[in-house]
Image (cartoon, rainbow, N blue to C red):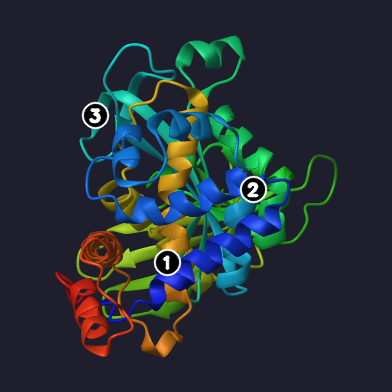
Amino acid sequence: MPIQNSNAFNKIRSLAGTNLRKIGNISKPRFKFLSTIFEQWLALPVRYTMLNLSRFGKYSEKSIRLHFEKFFDFVAFNRNTIESSCGKKLIAAFDPSYIPKSGKKTPGLGRWWSGKDQCALKGLEISCLSVVDTEAETAMSLEIVQTPSKEILEERKQNLVGHYVSIIEKNIETLKSLVSHLVADGYFMKYDFIIPVLKHGLHVITKMRSDANLRYMYSGPKKKGRGRPNAYGGKVDCCCIDKRRIRLFEEDDVACYYSGIVYCMALKCLVRIVYIQEKTTGRYDILLCTDKELDGSLIVRYYRLRFQIEFLIRDAKQHAGLEDCQARSENKLYFHFNMAFSVVSIAKAATWLSIPKEQREAFSMRNLKLLYYNKLLTERIFENLALDLNCKKIKRLYRQCLDIGQLAA
């Protein structure tokens, strides 16, 4: 996504300022800092430490540390971004992510599962709660919460799944105003996660085990006499489903898609499943949705869109310094993690979602970050040389400097 003009600067500045004003109760010094830090975050070419932020900006390291320590309502800020930029068809996505961290004094430090390395490593874990625009097929951050240490979880008499549920419960009113379905990967196919979320009014879409314990519902004649009437019509053989009860609704060159309502023994309730069977290998996957009325094709589409949260995490790690924080305060860590994700979201909203869908190319955080760095460097040189941007020749040269290093997406 080559960015050919400097309108991106005005769009991001304008959107960030508008969202900050909507929150209210922000002092003028705080408003000025937050407005500045969003643009500075995009321009930083080195590690995202507070010392480096002071080197490339106008605030001292001490001022930056003090501002990072103060609470900022990222949920309200991100909600404003989503409501002003995204379409109407939204779903929520939830996924934990591993953050490498050295040292001994950082809160929450422990051994956490790293999906990339497929093992538990020393560091931190964050939980990413995002909203996915199903029309634009992209994810926007809502809130990032650090997972507390296992000792703190024990003190709270709470397990890891209970902590994940508490994040959704905390934001349930915001989520219900935006979405009706939450998508998570197969790890969250647990009674302790799905049922509490369902009780709060959100339906869950996830992936089941290949040996899931499911029952067909009994639909035959009622038995006469005493005793409880039949409730189940037999166990579902996941390797060979009954295609009269779980029926084909779609087929393509790769797989056949079946859908039906069954009883899930793990959740103790009726659910709709989508059975996806590959034509060549016979391999199958089972998707589950607690919303029995949702169309099978939408269940498949929504679950596939869950992967957009992975792209959001990737951009935050590679281009927004998610893994660079050296702070040892919970408040500073919270601010840094949410800042990294919010900058990606607001950049995407201002420079990509604002373009008509038929004119969009692939979103490139790398190009946008390079554009901001070019602006920072070019303006510093032009100011020192006292060049007048009102001159057409110099203005043309200025714009050429902004596009240095841009790549086609």
Query: Percent from the top left, x then y, of residue 256?
Result: 36, 73
Of the residues under marks 2 and 3, which one precedes in the sequence?
2
Q: Which residue is mark 2?
A: 28
Amino acid residing under circle 3? Cys
| Residue at left offset 27%, top offset 76% | 1
In-front residue for pair 103/191: 103
Q: Are marks 2 and 3 in contact (CB under 8 Å)?
A: no
Q: Which residue is mark 3?
A: 119
Q: CA distance from mark 3 to mark 1?
A: 32 Å
Classed neighbour count for the residue bearing mark 3: other residues with Cα under 10 Å, few (<14), some (14–19), many (≥20)? few
Q: Which residue is mark 1?
A: 348
**Camera-side mark, 3 or 1:** 1
**Camera-side mark, 2 or 3:** 2
360 relative to 139 in the view: left or right: left
Q: CA distance from mark 2 to mark 3?
A: 46 Å
Query: Percent from the top left, x then y, of residue 342?
Result: 47, 52
Q: Quadrant of residue 163?
A: top right
Secondary structure beneath label 3: strand
In-front residue for pair 330/60: 60
Query: Percent from the top left, x then y, of residue 104?
Result: 32, 11
